[in-house]
Amino acid sequence: MSTLRAHWSLITHAMLRCAGFLVPCDQRNVWLQEWRSELWYVSRADSQEPDSVLASEKRAANFCMGAFQDAWYLRRDSRPAPQPFVRTSQSAMRCAAALFLITCVSCIASLLLPRVRSVMESLPYADPGHIVLIASAGFSSPELPSVRMRELRLWQSRTRQIFSEFAFYQPITRPIRLSSHYTPELRIAKATPNLFSLLGIRPAIAAMEHQSMPVLLVSENVWRKEFHGDPNLIGSTVEIGLHKAKLGGVVAKDQWRLPGVFDAWLLEPETATTISNSARGFVLGRLSVSASNRDLGGRWHMVAPQTDGDPGDYECVTLPEREGAPTHIYIFAVLLALLALPATTSLPLGEYPVQGSQMSWLLRLRRWVFLGVKFVLLLPAVYFTSLDFAHAFAVSLVTAQYIQLVLSFLMALFGFRWILKDQRRRCPVCLNTLTSPARVGEPSRNFLGWNGTELICSGGHGLLHVPELPTSWFATQRWLYLDASWSSIFLGSV
């Protein structure tokens, strides 16, 4: 009899042990102690009954079967209650959509505007890294004509180790006469015949070979407006002032990326010396292929002889360096705006207490993701918009670069300010814009009570307290979470 009772005791305790695996670990020991004590009382009560030992042990086993149900309910009730899903507010979605739309519009405008698109593309010249723009160091800007023709003719015989070829062009203004038709005053570049061959480009429908007369190349605008795009006029004789020239072809818009805005280019023949020694213009040089020239970099100073025998100081800039990639200007402006941002607005977003029971890590992460999305969408919008305004019009490259620098800095600075201000005025739970501002307190009681503005989330997630004057105990805005008991007075989460 005692042996049978011992076997049933092992079975019932094993059942409790198995049921205990369903109980959370931190509650398992206490739960087992309670059920073992209850089982002991059940066994003592059955031992006083006149029933057989087998019947009493069966009742104890049935009692232990209830432990499985109890353990299951305990495990289910111990799970944290799932937090209700909080949708992102419509105002946050509209904000991100508006920034995305601005970015797309500015990008499309950059692709549609010919001048802006050409700036974003690489230079159309052959090996532009070996083409150098030479300007006198005494001038305020390399975009102004600063080298005289007599200096170039002197260099052609003395700088073969550095430069293999030179080209020269001088800005002039003249009307063009074709038969009885006169054009208005046009901006013309009077150049040496190797100007376009040095650049490695060939104008469209050009007829320039073996010409004893100067060759006139016109821009696309002049070709359509003054010559009506008639290809039969190619090779005809035109008059430029008192001189005659052959109409040689058309220069595309994206083929001219050098200093000066021109309507036409007058290429003098090699045998002519119509460009006077005193003419002041722009000089291009193609670097010789040598190991020493590779170490010169994109910008350097050159000392070269002048006609009076004294050495002159000249600034040499390669064409890619002169272009000053718009991306470099943009990055510099954005970094400058980031440095100036703390001086124009406060950087902290406020005090938001960490309450795990009220706000999951996913909701906290969503708030920072929204902040990052605004920055990510703003930066390309600033880049493309500054390019559109800077390069959409026919201005010099230096002027366009200054315009891009100023616009990028201002748009980035005020854009960053707006992002921080917008983030401070949003609910950290649903990202909805806070509403119903109310003044609380009195200015004369800053040190006795709170004084400032109180805003509320229309979804009932909390209140934002913004101090009127920062104090030592209330230096920045604070967020106060509202628990579920407040939900009855709100229409519902946004």
Image (cartoon, grey):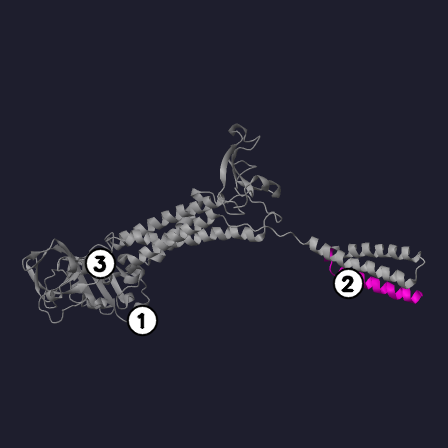
Given contact means CB atoms under 8 Å apart, are the residues at marks 1 and 3 in contact?
Answer: no
Q: Secondary structure at mark 1?
A: helix
At horizontal 17% and vertical 64% (from top left) the residue drawn is 250
- Marks 1 and 3: which is nearer the front? 1
**Vertically, is 212 above or below 458?**
below
Task: Residue 206: give x, y in percent of width and height.
Answer: 16, 68
Give the distance between the C-alpha atoms of the residues marked 1 and 3, in whole angstroms: 25 Å
Mark 3 burial class by Cα count in 10 Å: few <14, some 14-19, many 20+: some
* Disc nearer the start of the sequence (3/2): 2
- Marks 3 and 2: which is nearer the front? 2
Per the rendering, the mark at residue 453 is none
Residue 223 seen by the camera: yes
Give the distance between the C-alpha atoms of the residues marked 3 and 2, in whole angstroms: 98 Å
Q: Secondary structure at mark 3?
A: strand
Task: Residue 185: give x, y in percent of width and height.
Answer: 12, 53
Residue placed under numbered mark 3 in the picture: 312
* Disc nearer the start of the sequence (1/3): 1
At horizontal 48% and vertical 43% (from top left) the residue drawn is 433
Given contact means CB atoms under 8 Å apart, are the residues at marks 3 and 2 in contact?
Answer: no
Residue 11 is inside the magenta segment? yes
Given contact means CB atoms under 8 Å apart, are the residues at marks 1 and 2 in contact?
Answer: no
> Which quadrant of the rendered structure holds the N terminus?
bottom right
Residue placed under numbered mark 2 in the picture: 18
Q: Which of these two is toward me, 245 or 230?
A: 230
Amino acid type of disc 3?
Gly
Residue placed under numbered mark 1 in the picture: 291
- Marks 1 and 2: which is nearer the front? 2
Highlighted magenta segment, given as a residue range: 1-26
